[in-house]
Every structure is written in structure tokens, then in C-alpha cells.
Amino acid sequence: MKCPLESQDNLELLLDYGTARCTGREAAAFAQHLATCSACSRAIAEQQVVCGMLDEWEAPPVSASFTRRLYQRIEHGSGWRARLAESLTGAVRVLFVWRGVPIAAAACLIITAGILLDQRMATVPSHPPNAQVVEAAQPDQVVHELDDLEMLGNFDRSVRADGNSKL
Amino acid sequence: MQPQPKRAEWVETDVGGIAGTLDDTELMIRVKEGHEPSFALLLQKHRSPVVHFIYRMVQNAAVAEELAQEVFLRVYRARGTYEPTAKFTTWLFRIATHLALNSLRDGKYERLQETLETTSEDSAPRQLRDAKPTVEAAMVKQARLGEVRRAVAALPEKQRAAVLMHKYQEMEYAQIAKALNCSESAVKSLLFRAYETLRARLAHLA
């Protein structure tokens, strides 16, 4: 038998033997291997200790109201779900009764989509948006901006002149 | 014609005398066909294992019950589409694992993380196995349990789920693999690493 720790092939043997789930011929063969493999023996011993500790961890009992609360949730859920399912079924039935309705609806949808697409293509601007901004600027605005730039230039020059005179 | 018992009474009355004669898959097929008492039997059989599994995953009794209710609600709501392609418990624990992992990832129940001393409001108080444990022995046991719980909680999510299904639910590797949506060899590897980590973390208690 290949050593599970070395080959990783029979990992389940190590797991099952350690958790007492390995029985019969498999268990006997692995017991023979354990007699000659100290690493596996140590791993099994440690595994059994861990399993013993896990056994001590008891979960608290389920509360007495669990089932009642669950059925309340089922009742509550089934109420609005049933109504929703009923109304959806009704709508589908109407559509199937009026056999022409689904076809007409599909045709309307395609025509509407076509019209919307056509309108969108027609309204797409032929020039970049920046050009519109330049065209929208008024001559007064340009003059005002130039005045501001000149004022800033004068201010800059006067600051430099003050600095030089102090030095 | 006898009146149909209320849902909560189905388990006790065993409508149709089907308990013990049908396996889980057959019961679920009957639920699919509209036989609701079969659902009550499935609930009775799997309620505790599911709650306990989720409790050990999230380590909070109230949250575990809330999530377990969600598991059974989903089973009930999906009854119409149920196909017996796998064992019923595999399907059940796949839902339970999914919900528990989502809850852990959301972290919205972190504030509710209970200590060993706390219990849910309407659950019976925990009892120690020893007939007459001394205060000291009880404290030592509590400390050991605390270490075990912390060691399990520190495992990566998938390893934790695999160990709990393997150790406490005694599920087969193929079932665990389907529940965790991975291969059987991946499950064996997950379990080996998980037990190895637990051995290292709990060695000082041996």
C-alpha cells in the first residue's frame, strides 16, 4: 500500500481511519501500513484526538417555535405569491386568447424602435461639440476676456517692478 | 370525510402513514405533486441536522435558525422544479452551505456573534454531559470548547463546510463535492488540509 502522506493518493484512508469510517478489508490493510509508518501513525493519533474534541462540541437544541415560524413564513409567502402567479397567468391567458395581440405587439415594437433609431440618427451633430461653443461666444465676451488678460499682465509687471526696486 | 389537519400537526399525525416507508427523494417527489404532509416529514427529519450544521458554520444559534428557515423555505418554493438528480440531502446541504457562506461573507450578523455562555431566547439551556461536574471542570470544558470553536471558525470557509459535513453529517465525499460544487479529489484535499490545521491548532489541548 502506498503511504497516503507521501503519495496523496489514498488521502481518504487517512481521513476515514482517523474518523472511524473505514472498515473491513480497507481498514485491515491500512492497519498493516500503520504498523510500519510512524508518520501515518502519528497523524492518525492526532486526528483521533481532534475528532474527540469535535465530538464534545454540541449544538444547542432547535427552538420549539421553529416549525410554527416556518409555516407562518410559508403561509405569508404563499399568499402574495399565489396572487402574483394568478395575475400573471391571467395576463398570459388574455394574450393567448387574442392570438393576434402578440403579433401586433411585436410589430408595433419593431416599428417604434425603427422610428426612434431614425430620429436619433437625424439629430446627431455633424461637427464636434467644441465648435458649437466657439460659435455661441458673443463679440462682447471676447473683448471682455481680452481686457481681463491685459489687466492681469499689468498686475504681473507691477509686482515684478516692486520686487526689483526692493532688491 | 375527515378534516385535513393543520400544517403544524402533519408531523405528529403522519397523514397517510408514509413515515418510514419512503426515502427522502420519494417524499420530495410527493411534495412536488402537492402532498404537503411529506414536506412536514422531511422537515422533521432534517430540521436539526440543518440547523446544527449552520450553527457550527456561523456559530450563532439565532442566525442559524433564521438561515435554516430560509433553507426550508427555498426547498418548499422550489418543489415544483425539483428533479431527483442527486440525493435530497446533497441538495439540502448545498442550499444550506450557500446561505451560510453568503451570511459569513455579508458579515451582517457579526454583531450578533454570541459567546459560549449565551443561548437563544426560546432554546433549552445547554447541559453538560458529566453527571456532577465541578465548577473547575466545567470551566476547563468551556475553555476547551472555546478553543475548538475558534479553531473551526479560523478555517477557510470551504474547509470549514467540508469538515462539518464530513464529521457531523457523515456525508460521503461525492455528496460533499456536489454540495460545495467541486471535485471529489478537491474535497479530500480540503479535508486533509483542514484536519491538519485543526491538529496543529488543538495539539496543546491533547
Image (tube, coloured by chain):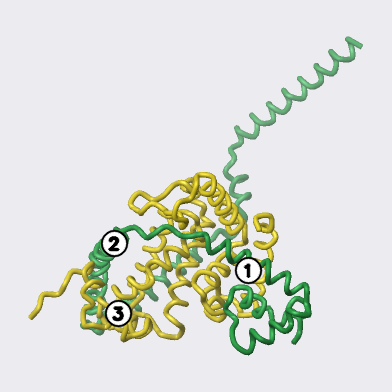
Chain colours: A green, B yellow
Between B183 and B17, which is closer to the camera in this rendering? B17
**Quarter of the figure that contains the N terminus of chain A:** bottom right
Residue in the foreground of this view, choosing between B145 and B137: B137
CA separation in Å, label 3 and label 1: 41 Å
Residue placed at 67% from the left, 74% from the top?
Answer: B189
Residue farthest right in this picture: A167
Q: Residues within 10 Å of mark 2 (few under 14, many from 20)?
A: some
B144 relative to A117 in the view: left or right: right
User: Residue B142 at what x, y percent from top left?
Assistant: 53, 50
- Residue B33 visible? The answer is yes
The amino acid type of the residue labelled 1 equals: Gln
Q: Amino acid at mark 3?
A: Val
Bin the neighbour count of mark 1 within 10 Å (Cα to Cα): few under 14, some 14-19, many 20 and up.
some
Residue in the picture at 63% in, 73% down: A18
Q: State which quadrant residue B88 falls in.
A: bottom left
Residue A14 falls in which quadrant of the image? bottom right
Q: Earlier in the sequence, mark 2 or mark 1?
A: 1
Q: Please report the residue visible at 89 percent of the width from the left and 14 percent of the height from the top.
A: A164
Task: Confirm whether circles 2 and 1 share one chain.
Answer: yes
Q: CA distance from mark 2 to mark 1?
A: 42 Å
Number of numbered labels in the structure image: 3
Q: Is residue A132 above or below residue B45?
A: above
The amino acid beneath tag 2 is: Arg
- The x, y position of residue A79, in whole percent, is 23, 65
Which residue is labeled 2 in the image? A73
Q: Give the label on residue B31, or none.
A: 3
**Residue of label 1:** A48
Mark 2 → mark 3, Cα distance in angstroms: 17 Å
Mark 2 belongs to chain: A
Badge 1 element: helix
Residue furthest out toward the bottom: A25
